[in-house]
Amino acid sequence: MAMNRAGGDGGRHLPPLATLAAFSIAYTFGEGLGRLACLSFGCCYGKPVDACSPAMRRLFAPIALVFSVETKKIAYAGEMAGVAVVPVQILTSLVHVAGGMAAILLFVQGAFGASFALSITVTQGWRFASELLRADYRGTGSLSAYQIMGIVAIAYSWGAMLLLPDMPARFSLAAGLAIFWSPTIIISLQVIWLSILLYTGLSRVTTAELRFSVRRDRI
């Protein structure tokens, strides 16, 4: 969506909270959808269901994940192939996408501060909680670096919501969509996407082998 301040300055100066909210919403969806890649690769995996408390076992047992392919990170790094684990990746995706949708509803109503605080609180609050359910290496100490950064981010978002001006703005969905119809934007996005695919899509820890053989019974 294209956006101008209510004063009509041509959109050159957006409200600070609107910019922060837009970035945080994009991050929320990116993190939520990106966890599907973690699910595919078998990284960012949860702890074994059997290692959870009785209440957690009852909760997660029906939806537990089991990875059995040896090229999954949980298999070669965590040595938990065939083990039922907490579906952290799926839960993260659901929580983040739901939080992103709620933040968008606040955003389009002009509640930029609340949108920013909500998206950061949901993503980083869940980041803190999900660390307690994960079994991959999170560093030493009682709190991981991610949990500490999550707490700081939540405090920052609420401070920004309370201290920065939440100025009204006008929205134009048509104008926003028109921006993406620009050849420059389209080509730039394709170059960025291709670069990301080549950098992150080529595994540096697994290999692949293509083999052909003859069905002699059909000769």
Image (cartoon, rainbow, N blue to C red):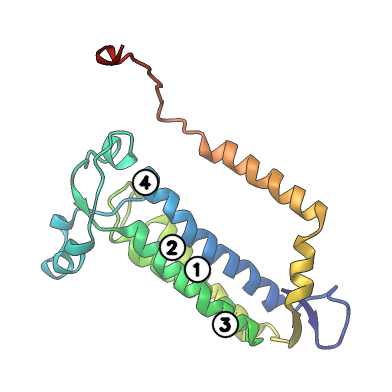
User: Which residue is the site of mark 3?
Assistant: 105
Q: Are marks 2 and 1 in contact (CB under 8 Å)?
A: yes
Amino acid on which the number 4 mark rests in the picture: Cys
Quadrant for residue 7, please give it. Answer: bottom right
Residue at the front extreme, as displayed: 219
Q: Say which of marks 1 and 3 sits in front.
A: 3
Whether residue 156 is visible here, answered yes or no, is yes
Secondary structure state at the residue bearing disc 4: loop
- Residue 113 in the image, given as x and y percentages of width and height: 61, 82
Q: Are marks 1 and 4 in contact (CB under 8 Å)?
A: no
The total of numbered circles placed on residues is 4
Task: Tell me the distance, in whole angstroms, between the alpha carbons under discs 2 and 1.
Answer: 6 Å
Residue displayed at 52% across by 66% down: 28
Secondary structure state at the residue bearing disc 1: helix
- Residue 181 in the image, given as x and y percentages of width and height: 78, 60
- Residue 16 in the image, given as x and y percentages of width and height: 72, 76
User: Which residue is the site of mark 1?
Assistant: 152
Amino acid on which the number 1 mark rests in the picture: Val
Q: Which mark is residue 43?
A: 4
User: Which residue is the site of mark 2?
Assistant: 148
Q: Are marks 3 and 4 in contact (CB under 8 Å)?
A: no
Q: Point out the tag, 2 or 3, that comes first from the N-terminus.
A: 3
